[in-house]
Amino acid sequence: DLLLSNSCIPFLGSTEGLDFRTLLLDEERGWLLIGAKDHIFLLNLVDVNKNVKKIYWPAAKEKVELCKLAGKDAHTECANFIRVLQPYNRTHVYVCGTGAFHPLCGYIELG
């Protein structure tokens, strides 16, 4: 219904089946940060498909292999699912992912 009424703009970057997990909205600066499977997206709130920035952040290959050896599904469990997007200061966001059952965290400079 929203598409038919032109009431929304679909995010075209989602065609990769990335399993979006967490969002961080900053209305002041006009962006939306999205955590997904092995990716972090930074979207413009005015047009979510304009100047999309994407960070590819997969789990380490050896961690994925350990995950598969433990009997986990390679496609649905052995990836880096981004779970935490937390403002740290005016220039950085604290980010954590599952890292194929070996959690990892870091900081993203928003610049």
Image: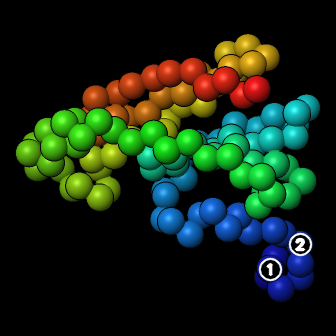
Q: On residue 111, which mark appears?
A: none
Residue at the disc numbered 1: 3
Q: CA distance from mark 1 to mark 2?
A: 6 Å
4 to 96, vertically: above or below: below
The foreground one among 22 and 59 is 59
Q: Where is residue 52? Give x, y as percent.
A: 72, 52
> In which quadrant is the N terminus drawn?
bottom right
Identify the residue at the far top of this view: 89
Q: On residue 7, which mark appears?
A: 2
Q: Where is residue 53? Give x, y as percent.
A: 68, 46
> Pointers 1 and 2 in contact (CB under 8 A)?
yes
Residue at screen point 24% across, 40% down: 61
How many residues crowd mark 1 within 10 Å: few (<14), some (14–19), many (20+)?
few
Q: Where is residue 6? Give x, y as percent.
A: 89, 78
User: Is disc 1 placed on a helix, strand or loop?
Assistant: loop
How many residues crowd mark 2 within 10 Å: few (<14), some (14–19), many (20+)?
few
44 to 3, vertically: above or below: above
Residue at screen point 54% across, 52% down: 20
Q: Amino acid at mark 2?
A: Ser
Q: Which quarter of the picture shows residue 100?
A: top left
Q: Where is residue 15? Give x, y as percent.
A: 56, 69
Residue at screen point 75% across, 43% down: 32
Q: Amino acid at mark 1?
A: Leu
Colour theme: rainbow
